[in-house]
Amino acid sequence: MSNTKDVFIFYQEYVKPLYCEIEARNNTLPVELLFEIHSSFDHLKRFYVGEEEEEVSCNKAVSHLKRGTLDAFKLKLKYFHIDLESLQKNSIDFSLLDNGNFWPNLLTDKNIVIQLAKNARLSESNPDPTKAFEIWSEASLEIDNFYSKYLNQQDKIDWAKEKTFAWLNKDTWRGIFVGFLTGCLSSFLIWYLTKQ
Amino acid sequence: MSLNSKIMAGIERKTGLSSAEIKNISPGKLREYLTKRTKKAFFVTTEFPEIGRGNILRDGIANSSEINSITDKILGM
């Protein structure tokens, strides 16, 4: 980054959309993401108000913005993990879906996401930060695919939830109630017929 | 220099805004829009220590109306 315009282009093309994605999930924005913009702005100030050279200020400013974008990718991974955990806690019989292939496929695709994210994390120590950004981008795309293939299939999941066998559900209680009532009525009938 | 087009398409789907709108909307207008869309109040949260290299907000989270109510209380309003 040799000039301030490049820094603002980076902000517009990468930071704004990725922050927007995080914000749109739950209408929240982590303060740590805002701190990176704060720090970036402070570096730009050093060129305009201080005595730092433009290129130096811009490089430092953009490195904070890059860190912010990597943090946004990490949050996306965190939210993916939370949503997957919540699906697992539902005790749904996923073998009912896709001829029993839903869960095995989900686990395979989950491992792809995790592997890409691991590679991305490891590449963060690389002197060239664009490498980490590229791999995080791939992980991010896989997360999007994962949502569309599994986590956003709400109709399917609801259907499987409905069909999942459970020892105690509303049908069991209904059966117990009807059985109890039938027992009482037949006992009464027998008592009534035999009392004479 | 621009974000991967597939990632951008995903963001457009999630936000309901086009790429150009995302790039040009002001933070205030975006917040207004997302508040209507999500039907939730906007919160500044903390995700430390997952991200960030230091954090001053250790007491939890507060939304804008709560912050105002705290200020109003200090001012006796």
Image: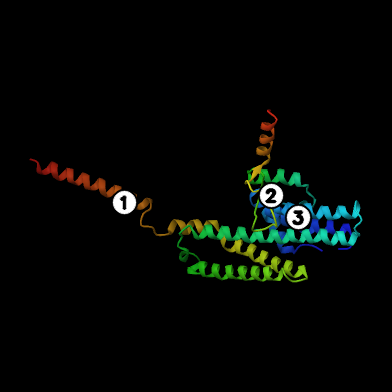
Above or below, A102 against A170 in this view is below
Give how far across and how far down residue A183 sits, in percent.
Answer: 22, 48
Q: Amino acid at mark 1?
A: Gly
Q: Quadrant of the N terminus of chain A?
A: bottom right
- Secondary structure, mark 2, is loop
Contact flag, marks 3 and 1 (Cβ < 8 Å): no
Q: Nearer the viewer, mark 3 or mark 1?
A: 3
Judging from the image, mark 3 belongs to the subunit labelled A
Q: Which residue is mark 2?
A: B56
Q: Quadrant of the C terminus of chain A?
A: top left
* Mark 3 crowd level (few <14, some 14–19, many ≥20, 10 Å Cα): many
Q: Which residue is mark 3?
A: A36
The answer to whether residue A54 is visible is yes
Q: CA distance from mark 3 to mark 1?
A: 60 Å
* Mark 2 crowd level (few <14, some 14–19, many ≥20, 10 Å Cα): few
- Front-most of A145 and A119? A119
Q: Is residue B5 left or right of residue A85?
A: right
Q: Which residue is mark 1?
A: A175
Q: Amino acid at mark 3?
A: Glu
Give how far across and how far down residue A65 sits, in percent.
Answer: 78, 58
Q: Is residue A87 left or right of residue B51?
A: left
- Secondary structure, mark 3, is helix
What residue sits 68% from the left and 71% below the top? A122
The answer to whether residue B18 is visible is no
